Image: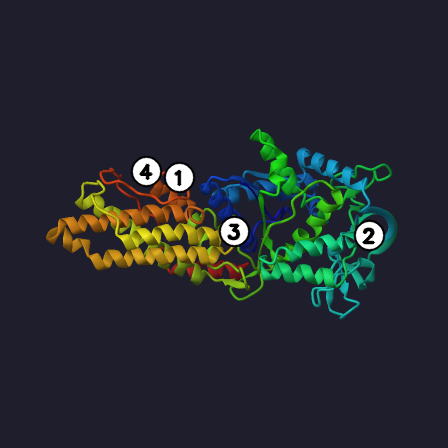
Amino acid sequence: MKILIGNAWTFANGSLHIGHLSSYMPGDVIARYYRAKGDDVYFVSGTDCHGTPIEIRAKQEGKSPREISDYYHDEYCYCFDKLGFSYDRYGKTSSDEHAKFVQEFHRAMYERDYIYEKEVPQAFCESCNITLADRFVVGKCPECSGQARGDQCEACGTVLDTDNLIEPQCSVCRSVPVFRLTKHLFIAISKLEKELIAMLDTHLHWRKNALAFSWRYINEGLRDRAITRDLDWGIDVPKKGYEDKKIYVWAENVLGYLSMSKIVAEQNNENYEDIWSMDSRHYYVHGKDNIPFHTIILPSLMLANGDTWKLPDNIISNEFITLEGRKISTSQNWAIWVKDIVDKYHPDSIRYYFIANSPEKRDSDFTWREFVKSHNGELLGAYGNFVNRTLVFVCKYFNSVIPVGRIVPEIDERIIELYHVVGNLIENGNLKEALETVFDFVRFGNKYFDTEQPWITRNTDVKHCSETIYNCIQMIANLATLLEPFLPFSSSKIMGWLSIEYGWKVKNIRAGVLIPEPEILFERLEKSVVDEELNKLKEK
C-alpha cells in the first residue's frame, strides 16, 4: 500500500520549540511503523519560507528573505536528524521544484470555475513599507470586541476580514495601516460546501478537534479567500496581469505535500499517480491551530484544481502543550528551543516524553521534573533495566551465548497479540495508548524476571534458568521491534546485539546466538537537572 504522511510545514521565522515537536512526532512514528510493515511510505514535509513575517525579519536584520529562511531550514534539518525523523523528503517552499509544481497546479485551477477576480482593500503599513498579511493586522473584533487578528478573533473564533477590524494596527510597529484597493484572485470555497460536507460525513474517525473545527467553519458559512497577494517574496502568479503579485502563502505551502511526494516518487522511479489512488492512505500531522488548512483549505485547492487528488484520510491534530503551567510564548522567550536540547539529552528520551505525554485529546503540560522522572523511571528503570539485566546475565553466566529454551505459551500469545493491538492503535493515530501498551509488556517482563529468580536457579535448576533467560530474550527482541517506531535509537542497538531482522513481525531468536557485551541503554539523569533547566528558563 502507498502511505503518504505529511507533517506540517515549519514557518521559517524562528527556531523550533517543543510545541512544534509535540505536533510533529506522531508523523515519524506512523512512517516508521508502515515501513516496518513493508508498505511504500512517502513521509514528507519542509520549511515554509515565504510570508510577511520573514520579509519583516529580513529587513530588521539587513538580510534577504532567502538568507533568513535558509538559515532556519538548516537548523530544522539538524534538529530533525538528531531526533531520528525519517523524512523521505524534507524540502522548502523556496525551492525551484516546489515553485514549478505550484505554478502548474494553479494554472490548471485558474482554468476551472472556482477562481475569480475581485477588487478588495489590502492593508499596507507605511511605516514598515510593506503589505501586511492578515495575521499581521491586529485590533478589536467587530463581534465581541475582543483582541483579534486580521484573519480571526482570538477570543470568539470568528473568521474576519482585515478591513472589518476595529482600531486596526500593524502588529510590528503599532502604526495604523492604510487600506488600498487592489485586484486579486479568489478561490470560491463557498461553492465547494457540498463536497467538503461529504468528506466530513465519511471521516467520522478524525480526532474530535478536527471535526469540531471543520464543522464550525462550514456552519458559520464558508468564505471565499484570496489566493494572491501584493508581496515581493514568494512564488510568482502564473497569470497575465498578475506579474507584480505572488501566490498567497496559504495557497501554496499546503501543496508542498504534493510537490515533495512527487519528488520522492520520481527519485524512486515510481508512478506518482499511484500515491493518490483510492488504495492509498494519507495522514496529515499537525497542531490544532493548523486544522482548517488541512481539512478545509487543502481539500478546497484539490477540488478546485479538478485532478483526481485523494482527500485526507486521517487528520492527526494534537492539542497544545504548555510549559511549566504557562502557555508557550516565543515573544516572551517562554519556550524550550529544540536546538538547545537535541545534543544534551538522549533522543529516545525526548521522543518518549513527547509521545507518552502527547496532547492527543487535551492540552498537556511539559515540566522538567516529569521529563527527568519519565526518563529515569520508564526508560532507565523499566525498559533499560530489563534489557541490561537480561543481557548481562547471558554474558556472565552463559558465556555470551543465548541459552536453550522454549517460549512460554502465555508469553508467546501476548507477543502475537501485541503486534495486532499496537499496530491498530498506531494506524488510528492513538500513539500514546500504543506506547503505554508496549510498556505494560516491559513491566510484565521485569515481573517475570523477578518471579523466576534466575540468579537463584542458575545454581539450583540450570534448565529452568535457561528457560527463563531464553524467554526474556524473546521478549526483548520483540520489544525492540515494537518500540522501533517510537524509540529508534535504542531499538537499533538491541537489534544489532541480537541480530534481529527488521520488520513488523514476531521475532524468534534462536539459542546459540553469540551476543556482544551490552552497553547501558540509558544513563540516569540527576535531579539537579530540574533546577538547572528551570533556572535557565526563568533567566530568559
Q: Residue furthest left?
A: 460
> From mark 4 to mark 2, how far is it between C-alphas?
63 Å
Residue 502, which numbered label? 1
User: In this rendering, which labeled residue sits more in front, label 4 or label 2?
Assistant: 4
Q: Does dot 3 land on a helix, a strand or a loop?
A: helix
Viewer-nearest residue: 247 or 2? 2
| Residue under the image location 31 percent in, 40 percent down | 497
> From mark 3 to mark 1, how far is it between C-alphas?
21 Å
Q: Does dot 1 land on a helix, a strand or a loop?
A: loop
Residue flagged by tag 4: what amino acid is it? Ser
Q: Quick check: 465 above or below 97?
A: below
Percent position of residue 21, x then y: 53, 52
Q: Residue furthest bottom?
A: 144
Q: Residue furthest top?
A: 269
> From mark 1 to mark 4, how far is it between C-alphas?
9 Å
Color theme of the render = rainbow
Residue 499, which numbered label? 4
Residue 357 in view = yes
Q: Quadrant of the C terminus?
A: bottom right
Residue 124, which numbered label? 2
| Residue under the image location 21 percent in, 40 percent down | 401
The answer to whether 59 appears left or right of 361 in the picture is: right
Q: Quick check: 173 above or below 511?
A: below
Crowding at mark 4 (Cα within 10 Å: few <14, some 14-19, many 20+): some
Residue contact at pointers 2 and 1, CB within 8 angstroms: no
Kindly identify which residue carries mark 3: 26
Q: Earlier in the sequence, mark 3 or mark 2?
A: 3
Q: Earlier in the sequence, mark 3 or mark 1?
A: 3
User: In this rendering, which labeled residue sits more in front, label 3 or label 1?
Assistant: 1
Residue 237: quadrant of the picture: top right
